[in-house]
Structure formats: structure tokens, C-alpha cells
Image (tube, rainbow, N blue to C red):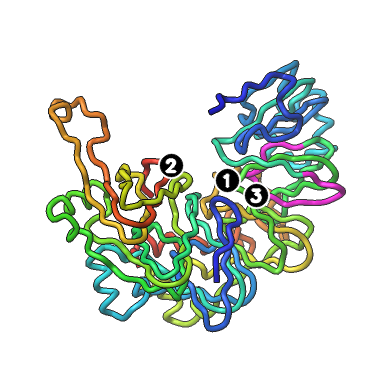
């Protein structure tokens, strides 16, 4: 059930019998038909183990399960919404940016600190993402929130992309990310450019960037 | 890369949006507007409070809400007037012998050919007649047709259809566990236990987020038996303004459940 984009901040999704969607709690704006919204204590798929994993990783955003027969409109906080269709790849996104996603997508939690050792840890601090991120894998769609519009930048092996950590929204594909620093004596004396930290994404895939440096 | 578009009195659109956040009124005569929503104007325009002197007549013809007249002014004259409201999306709507009920905080301005009345639903105003009005919303407005159930915070207004009723998801509200969930948020409230349900023929206006615009007091209604929202001075709890449990979602989010 793909998402229909109603406007820059609102999407509509159909739910049929036997299908289910996950959405952030309180993000439903309206619905038609007989649809039920069940609070999902586990914060998504998997069993209790996955739930504990998400709690530890601080990726446990309140989710609800949407089931029934009808269509539901989603929107949250006036943020812009970007629909990302996945065909077997993996999407890496912060859990609190997920507005809604297909139940057919496999949800997981990934330790990002393993990429790049100590710099990986620093990366988590600087981007405010922490060390963990949520992964969605499989065939289906996800609606991701961003402050301001979303720009899609392709990453190819020849062209790595540098992103301001605060503007980073999500990425997908076979992408390595690394925090690159441009710290010099200017930063030490307080005359920095304000762009000392950048996220370098290399490999094959896509990165989504928001048109704002404000976190959600 | 083009620079910013520079408007003058002739290139400003007449009764149309300049951009999603500002609306230009081609004023020939009178318009009602909420205080403080005019950002600029060309021409000779005077702004008067309602209910003084010769404008008193207007109250009886098109402004039937004497109790919140203090929040409105009449713009009178000839020229182009720009309206905006805290960078919210602004849209104009045309009514043709119709009626539309809108949340009081969302209405910015209207033509005097429309008449404004207080809805019997507290916090809402009804516009009746033929003419144009301008309303703001937090995010673009989506039009939907009933039957539909709407998050109370996402509702902007409705046209032509009967007033909504409350819809509760009884599976989650009933019983001891339901009560516990509702009061504490423990056990998980989906935040979607309560909606406004619309049936019949008409159009429902939704804004794209559940963040409300600050509400404007619509004035009190007479404390009479049988008047919804009346009798705000305590006493009979039966006629109290209904307490909407619509902020359950906020509660549960705070609990992190």
C-alpha cells in the first residue's frame, strides 16, 4: 500500500484486510472506513527482545499499529514529509523521524558506532543521533519527516557526498559514513567557520538532506 | 536565479495569494478583519473598530457576534491590502449561498456580504451567505468528503455538512484497563481514541498537522438552559463546555509509552 502524497506535509495510506501499518503515535489526522489504532508498546516489530534492544538503543519511539479497512491521513508537527519507496534495500533513519511505514518492512536497530571507531562515537554525538539508528529493510514505503523540504542526493563510488550533520535526514543503500573534521587553529581560538564537522557518505546509494539545520 | 519579485500597486494580485503566507485584498468598500492581521496596504484605507458610530449598523447586518466585536476591525476605502498571520498558510474561500463553520482562531478576514455568527459548538464561527473570506491554517488545507473521522486538533472547519459528533474508540476506553490507560497513559494510549465524526454531504477542511493555532475567544454565549457552552459560571455540570480528552496523545508521549 503505497503512500499518496496529499501535500508537502501530509500523506494518505490505504489499509486493507490483513495489512498493517506502523505510525508514530498521534500522527493520524483523519481516516475513512473502519480502522483501528493500537498502541504498540514494543515500539515496532519483533518480540520482547527487539523491544529491549530498542529501549537500550534509545530508538524506541512511541508507535501504533494501524489495521483495518480504509484509508488514513498522516501528518505530524507541521514537518515536511518525504515518502521513500524501498525495493529490497535498507533505509537508515532515526526512529523519531519515522512518520509511518509499511508493515511489510523489516524494522531493526543498528549500532552505528562500529563504523569508524572513535570517530563513529563522536559522529553520534555531533549529529545528535546517538550511537544507534533504525533500519528498515524490504519492499514497501516509509514516510519520513524533515524540517523544511527534503533534497535527495545520489551517492556514487566516484562522488562522495559531504553533509552537515544537522541537516542529515536518512540514507539508503550500501553507504559508509564517516565524520570528517576540519578542525584547525581557527576553531581553537573561536573563529571557526561553523562547519567544522561534516558527514562524509561514500559508496552507492542515496542520502536525504533537509533544507534546515534544525533537528526535529 | 531570479531575485525576489517586486510588487507595486498594479502588479499585486487582486483577491489572491501573493505567496502561500500572504493574501492581497482588492479593497473597494468594506472588509472585516481580525485585529493585527493587516501587514501592509496601498491606497486610502481606514481601520475602524466595530460598534462605534456609523459602523454600528454593520453589526446588525453582517456581524452577529456582538460579544467578540472587540477583536475585529473594519477596513474601509480603496486600495490593496495585504493580510498575513504569523507565517501560517493563508487561503481564500468563496461561498455561494453557502455556509461554512471554522475554528475561530483560523479566520482572518471576510467580506461584509457574508454574515458571521457564533456556532453552537464552542470555539467555532459560522459564515453564511455569498462572498469571500480568508482563513489561515497550520500547513496547507486538505479538503475531504464525509464520511470521515478527524483528529480534533487537525480540524479547521466544515462546509454544508451537519455538525460533527464525538467518536470514541471504545475498545480502548472501556473497562478498568481502558480507564487506567486514559488516566495514566500506562499501557499505551495511541493518542487516537477520540475523533470528530462527520457524516452527510459536504466538505471537511483539515490542516496538515495536529498543532493547533492559538484559539481566539469567541465570546461567551448567554447562560441559558439549553444553550451549549452557556453557563460557564459553574453550577450545572451538564451544560459545561465538554472536556475533550484529545490531549491523551500528549500525555502518553510525555510518559514515553
Tell me the chain of label 2: A
**How far apart in space, not on screen, are marks 3 and 1 (Cα)?**
8 Å
Tally of numbered discs: 3
**How far apart in space, not on screen, are marks 2 and 3 (Cα)?**
31 Å
Question: With respect to residue B173, does B163 lie above or below?
Answer: above
Q: Is residue B84 left or right of residue A74?
A: right
**Circles 1 and 2: CB atoms closer than 8 Å:** no
**How far apart in space, not on screen, are marks 1 and 2 (Cα)?**
30 Å
Toward which corner of the image does residue B39 lie, by quadrant? Answer: top right
Q: Is residue B3 left or right of residue A58?
A: right
**Circles 2 and 3: CB atoms closer than 8 Å:** no
| Dominant secondary structure, magenta | strand
**Residue depicted at x 85% and y 47%:** B96
Residue where numbered disc 1 is placed: B215
Residues tagged by mark 3 and mark 1 found on one chain of the structure:
yes
**Circles 3 and 1: CB atoms closer than 8 Å:** yes
Amino acid at each position: 500500500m503505497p503512500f499518496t502524497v496529499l501535500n508537502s506535509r501530509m500523506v494518505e495510506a490505504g489499509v486493507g484486510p490483513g495489512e498493517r501499518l506502523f505510525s508514530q503515535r498521534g500522527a493520524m489526522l483523519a481516516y475513512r472506513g473502519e480502522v483501528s489504532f493500537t498502541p504498540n508498546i514494543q515500539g515496532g516489530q519483533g518480540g520482547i527482545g527487539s523491544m529491549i534492544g530498542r529501549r537500550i538503543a534509545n530508538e524506541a519511539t512511541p508507535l501504533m499499529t494501524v489495521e483495518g479497512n480504509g484509508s488514513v491521513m498522516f501528518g505530524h508537527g507541521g514537518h515536511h514529509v518525504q515518502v521513500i519507496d524501498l525495493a529490497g534495500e535498507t533505509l537508515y533513519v532515526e526512529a523519531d523521524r519515522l512518520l509511518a511505514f509499511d508493515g511489510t518492512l523489516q524494522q531493526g536497530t543498528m549500532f552505528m558506532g562500529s563504523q569508524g571507531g572513535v570517530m563513529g562515537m563522536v559522529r553520534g554525538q555531533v549529529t545528535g543521533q546517538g550511537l544507534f539508528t533504525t533500519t528498515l529493510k524490504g519492499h514497501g514505503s516509509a514516510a519520513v519527516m524533515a524540517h523544511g523540504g527534503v533534497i535527495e542526493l545520489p551517492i556514487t563510488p566516484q562522488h562522495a557526498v559531504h553533509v552537515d550533520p544537522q541537516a542529515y535526514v536518512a540514507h539508503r543503500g550500501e553507504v559508509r559514513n564517516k565524520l570528517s573534521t576540519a578542525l584547525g587553529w581557527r576553531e581553537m581560538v573561536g573563529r571557526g567557520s561553523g562547519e567544522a564537522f561534516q558527514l562524509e557518505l561514500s559508496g552507492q546509494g542515496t542520502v536525504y538532506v533537509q533544507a534546515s539545520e534544525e533537528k526535529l | 536565479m531570479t531575485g525576489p519579485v517586486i510588487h507595486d500597486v498594479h502588479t499585486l494580485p487582486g483577491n489572491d495569494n501573493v505567496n502561500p503566507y500572504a493574501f492581497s485584498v482588492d479593497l473597494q468598500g468594506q472588509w472585516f478583519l481580525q485585529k493585527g492581521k493587516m501587514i501592509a496596504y496601498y491606497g486610502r484605507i481606514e481601520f475602524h473598530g466595530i460598534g462605534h458610530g456609523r459602523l454600528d449598523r454593520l453589526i446588525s447586518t453582517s456581524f452577529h457576534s456582538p460579544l467578540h466585536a472587540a477583536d475585529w476591525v473594519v477596513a474601509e476605502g480603496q486600495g490593496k491590502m495585504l493580510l498575513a498571520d504569523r507565517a501560517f498558510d493563508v487561503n481564500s474561500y468563496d461561498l455561494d449561498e453557502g455556509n461554512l463553520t471554522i475554528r475561530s482562531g483560523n479566520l482572518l478576514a471576510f467580506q461584509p456580504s457574508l454574515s458571521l455568527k457564533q456556532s453552537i459548538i464552542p470555539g467555532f464561527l459560522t459564515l453564511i451567505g455569498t462572498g469571500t473570506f480568508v482563513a489561515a491554517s497550520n500547513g496547507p488545507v486538505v479538503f475531504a468528503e464525509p464520511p470521515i473521522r478527524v483528529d480534533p486538533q487537525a480540524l479547521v472547519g466544515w462546509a454544508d455538512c451537519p455538525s460533527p459528533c464525538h467518536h470514541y474508540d471504545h475498545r480502548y476506553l472501556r473497562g478498568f484497563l481502558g480507564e487506567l490507560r486514559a488516566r495514566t497513559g500506562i499501557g499505551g494510549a495511541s493518542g487516537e481514541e477520540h475523533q470528530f465524526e462527520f457524516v452527510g454531504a459536504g466538505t471537511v477542511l483539515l490542516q496538515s498537522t495536529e498543532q493547533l493555532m492559538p484559539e481566539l475567544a469567541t465570546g461567551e454565549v448567554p447562560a441559558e438552559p439549553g444553550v451549549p457552552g452557556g453557563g460557564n459560571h459553574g453550577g450545572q455540570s451538564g451544560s459545561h463546555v465538554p472536556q475533550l480528552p484529545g490531549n491523551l496523545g500528549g500525555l502518553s508521549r510525555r510518559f514515553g509509552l
